Amino acid sequence: MPNLAEAQAIIENSDVLFSAEEVSAAADRMAAAITEKLGGEYPLVLSVMGGAVVFTGQLLPRLMFPLDFDYVHVSRYGDKTHGGELVWRTAPKEDVKDRVVLVLDDILDEGHTMAAIRDKVMEMGAKAFYSGVFANKLIDQAKPIAADFVGIDVPNRYVFGYGMDVRGIWRNLPEIRALK
């Protein structure tokens, strides 16, 4: 975990890619698209801890239809900047059976985490699976899954803010930044 001076240096050595206003507008667009597609389904919404906490907390009040809410906790990053082994801390609950499930995450990088969650949810008997990510990273390789709902597309840089961290910090920023 960086100290205070190191944390400030991270901000000073980053660029704002999307302002707080642009982030909020993207969340509005996502909520409208999700409502149009799933508003009549009474879905189970699963938030991926901990990166999706900020995004989920901002998105849920914009969804004006009944839903159930729970979470999963799976990670490939920890406090690192590169993905590693997939670790399940909290798997989906059994109540996914015969449900339309919407999984929300902060970012779709290479797509391995979301694909693993999809596979697990479908193995557990979900009727349908949808994914929503606030940020979709534009990379030069095929991903095993494409998100059904995307807030913004980000370049292939290390991005943080609005739930996404850098070295374990700065999830609380209202904008999206990228390391230089």
Image (cartoon, helix red, strand yellow):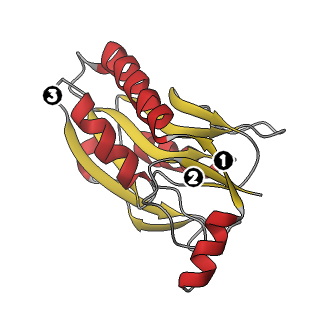
Residue indicated by mark 3: 66
Whether residue 26 is situated above or below residue 114 in the rendered picture: above
Q: Which mark's residue is nearer the viewer, 1 or 2?
A: 1
Answer with left or right where residue 38 lies relative to residue 86. left
Dot 3: few (<14), some (14–19), or many (≥20) neighbours within 10 Å?
few
Please give the name of the residue rendered at 82% of the width and 39% of the height, measured from the top-left corner: 141
**Cα–Cα span, label 1 and label 2:** 9 Å
Residue indicated by mark 2: 113
Q: Where is residue 124 in the image (x, y as percent from the top left)?
A: 37, 45
Whether residue 32 is situated above or below residue 123 in the rendered picture: above
Toward the left, the furthest residue is 66
Where residue 125 sits, quadrant-wise, is: top left
Find residue 42 and name its label.
none
Specify whether residue 80 is in view. Answer: no
Give the residue type that dot 2 points to.
Thr
- Cβ atoms at labels 3 and 2 below 8 Å apart: no
- Cβ atoms at labels 1 and 2 below 8 Å apart: yes
Residue indicated by mark 1: 109
Please give the name of the residue rendered at 51% of the width and 44% of the height, measured from the top-left corner: 119
